[in-house]
Image (spheres, helix red, strand yellow):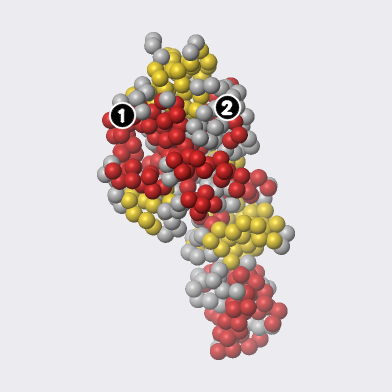
Amino acid sequence: MAAVDVVVLGAGAAGLMAAIRSAESGAGTVLLEKNRKPGVKILASGGGRCNLTTTREGSELLGAFPKPQRRWLTPSLRAFPPRRLRAWFEERGVALQEEAMEKVFPVAGCASVVLEALVTALAASGAELRCRAPVREVARGDGGFVVTTPDGEVRARRVVLAVGGKSYPKTGTVGDGYGIARALGHTISSLRPGLAGLVVDDPHLRALAGLTIEDAAVHWMVGDRRITTWRRPVLFTHTGLSGPGPMNFASVVEESGGGKLAIDLMPDASFEEVESGLLDRLRAAPRRGVVASLPTTLPERLRQALVHRAGVGADVIGATLTREHRRRLGHLLKGLEVDAKRSTGWDHAEVTCGGVVRDEVDPKTMASRSCRGLFLCGEILDVDGPIGGYNFQAAFATGWVAGGAAAR
């Protein structure tokens, strides 16, 4: 069998874009996908709506990623930034809308329109899609590579590895690409589930399951220092915490073997303003219970939990609340401390943290520095961003760059 120019492994966001770009650049391209259809994770993303990118651009976009990743990501995010990605989809009939927290979704409210645009573009590009084609081995061969599948071998001059990571394995991403990368000379950094809920053992917090705080500042604490902050919603669950704020800390919780978060429930007010407002409400209604004197913008069950955490008795009223207890309540409103034991794990993770070491991949072309003719893109790389479309943006951008470079 004659060798094709490029074979792309994995038909997720990165792989689809890489195959489209490769074929549109004139290379004979084959896209292999082990699932029975492409883009399974795309369909599952964003609650089935697909938050495909962010409104942020330039330094604001790069600043959302972990600091060690920013310089490496700069070439691909400049080559294919969010505005260009949005234009790409809109030119193919996908109307988009901006939503809270800098998110961008299809107006149709369903991820299927995003996948349909990609699959249609793939067909128009001339690339061949083969589903139910899991890759068993990628080996160097004469003048390129031999890719082994259950249906036989595919020979290619160049290979784009875009098989994803380990997150959300029910979509088929079980980490099988790391073995391929290792066999071709690459190093895999420590792998951790990212963008997952957090497990908290405190039964009083678990009792708050179902409550959502739409505006909170979540801090990662080291001692008494606030190291990282995300101002995002917080959801209390039967296992602990979820929502964008806590989920952004899943990786660091895993890496640290647990850790402490502090949730600022009133992020627009200083401690002094919170304490003064509480004192005013207590004085205005001295016979009222303390729970009713806390800010009514917070759910009653949460206010009850704060009063319990402060050590205030159920029968205490405003007139009998001590200064010490009032200050404790103020500190809890500005920094409810939570001990996170671990994340909820790979089954619930939206992204993989860790992967193929970035220094082994040319950021301008996604070409392997360890294996000539190999290109890597998407979640298999040691690249991860926060909730908000950043990981799809990185996948599409690195896929765009990899596909174009592989076709040359």
Q: Residue at x 51, y 37 (%)?
A: 379
Which quadrant of the figure contains the N terminus? top left
Q: Is residue 46 left or right of residue 139?
A: left
Where is residue 350? Give x, y as percent: 50, 44
Left or right, 228 with respect to 100, comes to right
The foreground one among 133 and 91 is 91
Location of residue 169 with respect to 145 vertically, above or below = below
**At which x and y percent is residue 331?**
65, 72
Quadrant location of the C terminus? Answer: top left
Question: Residue at image x 56%, y 45%?
Answer: 70
Closer to viewer: mark 1 or mark 2: 2
Q: Secondary structure at mark 2?
A: loop
Disc 1 or 2, which lies upstream in sequence? Answer: 1
Q: Which residue is mark 1?
A: 125
Residue flagged by tag 1: what amino acid is it? Answer: Ser
Q: Mark 2 = which residue?
A: 369
Q: Quick check: can you spot residue 173?
A: no
